[in-house]
């Protein structure tokens, strides 16, 4: 009878130790932004990437619908963010940081287009919120990379990217008011 109690006590202790460690891990780690990034396709170190850039440029510049243009800028910004992350994991730091910078300028273009659109018309519900989530996700990814960069020039370029990100965030807050 004592053996059964001892076994049950040990099982409960093991169970509680696993659940408490999971709770502690959840408390310590920051909550990630719940925003799903798209698959990037070809990344900048691929030989056919230039064709993709031309296609993207044509799509943006030949689109007449302003809402579609905002969505295209947002999609391209998110894809470039993922490309930068992939390149960083491949240890191609210089190209990665350039791609992060392009992602932030693309995101800034989306926010600027939304600002122009909201001056003349009421933007669809949820679009500003979607852009805000994207800006927050961009900041999260760039901050995760920021701690691993050691070169001062590349660090400065990443900080410029974050500066563009913060300007886009403040512009979205003005649009949402």
Image (cartoon, rainbow, N blue to C red):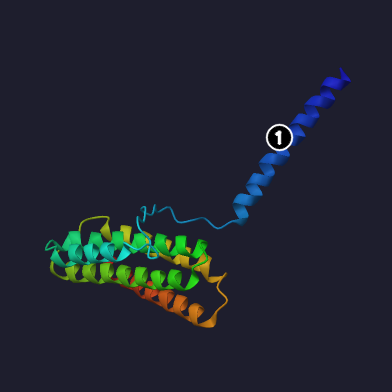
Q: Residue at x 80, y 29 (%)?
A: 9
> Element under label 1?
helix
Q: Please indicate whether residue 54 sits to the left or right of residue 147 in the image.
A: left
For disc 1, the marked residue is 15
The picture places residue 64, in percent across and down from the top left corner, at 11, 63
Give residue 28's quadrant in the image. Answer: bottom right
Which quadrant holds the C terminus? bottom left
Give residue 165's quadrant in the image. Answer: bottom left
Q: Residue at x 42, y 79 (%)?
A: 160
Q: Please indicate whether residue 145 sits to the left or right of residue 2 in the image.
A: left
Q: Residue at x 80, y 31 (%)?
A: 10
Give residue 7's quadrant in the image. Answer: top right
Which quadrant holds the N terminus? top right
The picture places residue 157, in percent across and down from the top left corner, at 45, 79
- Residue 138 appearing in the image: yes
Q: Residues within 10 Å of mark 1 (few under 14, many from 20)?
A: few
């Amino acid at each position: 009878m004592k053996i059964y109690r001892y076994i049950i006590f040990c099982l409960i202790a093991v169970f509680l130790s696993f659940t408490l460690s999971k709770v502690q891990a959840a408390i310590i780690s920051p909550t990630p932004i719940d925003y799903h990034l798209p698959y990037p396709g070809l990344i900048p170190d691929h030989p056919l990437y230039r064709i993709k850039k031309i296609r993207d440029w044509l799509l943006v510049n030949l689109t007449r619908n302003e809402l579609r243009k905002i969505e295209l800028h947002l999609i391209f910004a998110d894809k470039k963010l993922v490309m930068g992350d992939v390149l960083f994991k491949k240890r191609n730091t210089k190209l990665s940081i350039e791609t992060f910078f392009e992602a932030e300028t693309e995101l800034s273009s989306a926010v600027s287009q939304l600002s122009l659109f909201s001056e003349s018309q009421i933007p669809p519900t949820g679009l500003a919120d979607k852009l805000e989530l994207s800006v927050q996700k961009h900041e999260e990814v760039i901050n995760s990379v920021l701690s691993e960069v050691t070169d001062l020039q590349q660090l400065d370029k990443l900080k410029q990217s974050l500066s563009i990100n913060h300007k886009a965030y403040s512009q979205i807050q003005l649009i949402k008011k």
